[in-house]
Amino acid sequence: MWARRFVPVFIPPATNTHIQAHTLHPPLVALAPPIACSPTSLRSAHASEAGGLSGAPLRDASTAVLGRLYDLTRGEVPLIGVGGVASGRDAYEKIRHGASLVQLYSALAYEGPGLVSDIKQELAQALREDGFARLSDAVGVDTAVGRARRQQQQQAPPSQQ
């Protein structure tokens, strides 16, 4: 679906207004799937250090941004989930909050390429445990839009499912 080249649009963890400004600007969304979210300058105890926060400390904030983006775009724009993905469970959480794609960075640097195989196995196990036949069935299910869609599907007559 997104096989063409694209320029990523990085969305920082921010207020809903900031997210709406990035997400609902049609030229940005037309360029590429937004990446939620980029390394940030929110460093708490490390505020005096240069650079941005990335990896595990960003996991919860980036997942929250991802869910808000999914709801704001009504699940119609593919999103790339980043920030703290170090296991299949982490990837699954991003997917359930709206990621169509998941990016590895910090954990891949620390764990090496074997991490990819581990994540694939853990992700497949999580999908089976939750009864999803395909990864795409799990995209966005933990968002308001995803919950509404699942409820509609459950209420639809069998011939429409």
Image (cartoon, rainbow, N blue to C red):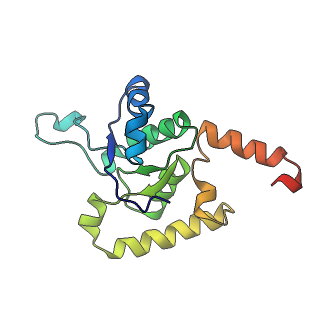
Find the residue positioned furthest to the top: 17
Left/right of residue 159 with respect to residue 88 in the rendered view = right
Q: Say above or below: 120 vs 75.
A: below
* Picture residue at 67% right of the left edge, 66% below the top: 133
The location of residue 8, given as percent across then percent down, is: 32, 49
The location of residue 68, given as percent across then percent down, is: 49, 35
* Picture residue at 46% right of the left edge, 42% below the top: 66
* Picture residue at 62% right of the left edge, 47% below the top: 141
* Picture residue at 39% right of the left edge, 42% below the top: 62
Judge by depth and name the residue closer to the eye, 26 or 64.
26
Left/right of residue 42 with respect to residue 28 in the rendered view = left
The location of residue 49, given as percent across then percent down, is: 11, 39
The location of residue 149, given as percent across then percent down, is: 70, 43
Q: Quadrant of residue 41?
A: top left
Of the 4 image quadrants, the one containing the C terminus is: bottom right
- Total marks shown come to 0
